[in-house]
Image (cartoon, rainbow, N blue to C red):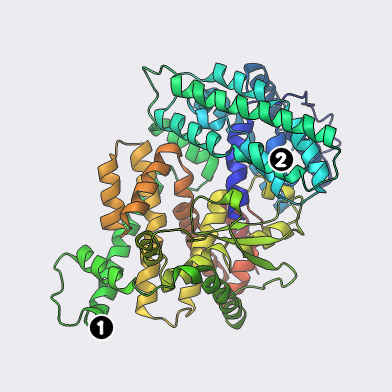
Amino acid sequence: MLFKLTVANILFIAALTGCKKEGGTGTGPLLGKDDEAFVKYENVFLDNFWKLNPDWATSVGYHKYDSLMVLPNQASRDKLINFAKYQVDSLSRFEPNTLNEGNKIDYKILQNQLDYLQWQLTHLRQFEWDPSSYNIIGTFAYILNEHYEPLPKRLRHFYQRMAFIPQYYKDAEKQIKNPVVELTSLAIEQNLGGLDVIAKDFADSLKKTNIPKAEQKLMTDRASQSVTAIKAYADWLKALKNDHPRSFRLGKDLYEDKFKYEIVAGNTAEKTYNAAVERKKYTHREMAKISKQLWPKYMGKAAMPKDSLEMISKLIDTISTKHVKPEDFQSAIEQIIPKLNNFVKTKDLLTLDPTKPLVIRKEPGYMAGVAGASMSGPGPYDKNGNSYYNVGSLAGWSSEKAESYLREYNNYILQILSIHEAVPGHYVQGVYSNKAPSIIKAVFGNSAMAEGWAVYTEQMMLENGFGNNEPEMMLMWYKWNLRSVCNTILDYSVHSGNMTKDEAIKLLTREAFQQQAEADGKWKRVSVTSVQLTSYYTGYKEIVDLRDAYKIKMGDKYKLKEFNEKFLSYGSAPVKFIREAMLAKTGG
């Protein structure tokens, strides 16, 4: 589910630049103000929305517009703004307090998304300064590699979409003004890096079909023209004179607004940052207590450093030598999943659905690039599809690089990683989300809710005895949890302040105990993204705070399983909205 949500969020930003095909912008007169009328409105809204956002539609399994492509120009942006204004007006004709609980949340989600859309186009104006937002490869890779329809049909849609590519990149060049240097480099890297999808993979797939040779020739010719257009865009960016580039830092005001629309939290970005700073201090204190306890076991009579962070670091380095062999990385994960399933069932933490199997697989080639793990869940229009736990391969890595990576993902953290990605983290949340009756909550899935749930489940599993309460497991979880905490501190400090690269690396290596290579990668990430890094800690903190409040409200009737399942029953809605619903009622 993580992968799907991430792709959707990226496509949302990219898709806001318009659509070649005219789309209806009206919903017609409303039949009433009740729940039935609201559901009808949602369905009409979505079909009109997909006409204007065919890339996003494809990614969520809505394939009616697979042959269309988003084109970037002012006329297209004007259509989207007009669409948003019209829909805001249509929404205002409903009284949200008269709607049932689920529809009331849908109303708030739609209202936020429409406001966000207008803000992006009129205030953020990312289409001017982010050349990496112009990248068509992702949707083509999806059409090619996801088996939702017969291959020949998908390839013909692929072929039809390619017709738009030359004009797409010509229009893109006209939009760009004083672009961010880091995002310009990213655009060149990503566009050229994805060329094989069109240049090679498309032709290879054609050979597996019975499409007539003459037709195949037309299709491969268009692919060649597409490759030429993409290369020309990269060359144009390389040669672009950019004397006054925009800073990659978003700035405090834009950051607060983006946080408000994208995270939909109960607090501001600044208050969330302050909470993360306090959480870091608390975590360091707890890690120091555990480290003092474990020091004699691992370090013998060696002198204990007076600097608590140095002491923690030395102990983590020593314990991290316990890890699997490079060739056993995937098989180790395969052995962990049944253990997690059994623990969840034994402790009665959640009801797991055996009809929605989790497939553990080697990370597909088109997703490769960074070893590790990710979750690919079925989209809201393909609820019966498979869930995949994608595991990166370390094949071909130098022994030094593999050793560094495996120390990071040692025997303890590998288990925590699988809790986060799979059970009861992203995979389980995705299954519950697809059972929720509202498709709005799935389409506009809140990343802070999804990431927050995954982080929360790590703590929840350990609280209930997973890992046999070993202090080593707790120490490693605190280290892992510091990732989420320091992601928030880093992102806010960089984009709302002036944190330098050296300061960022020091935060990540000394205070979050991360490897140098990992810290370098995080600096690159924060220089080409904003706000997303805050989703982990923000969602986690809001879920833990909600659980505490819900426990007080329910008193003797409180049960952890009931809380977990009730929380997940709302789908991928912002925690802020789920909190309002769960604390509004009395009873179970």
Amino acid residing under circle 2? Ala
Q: Quadrant of the C terminus?
A: bottom right
Decide if residue 273 is in sight here: no
Q: Which residue is mark 2?
A: 203
Q: Which mark is residue 450?
A: none
Image quarter for residue 347? bottom right
**Does residue 520 lie above or below 185 as drawn?**
below
Quickly name the residue at label 1.
297
Is residue 499 visible in the rendered image? The answer is yes
Amino acid of disc 1 = Lys
Whether the residues at callouts 2 and 1 have beta carbons within 8 Å, the answer is no
Residue 355 drawn at (x, y percent): 75, 70
- Crowdedness near tag 2: few (<14), some (14–19) or many (≥20) residues, C-alpha within 10 Å: some
Q: Crowding at label 1, few (<14), some or many (≥20) Cα neighbours within 10 Å?
A: few
For mark 2, give the secondary structure: helix
In this view of the protein, which residue sits in the foreground, 558 or 316? 316
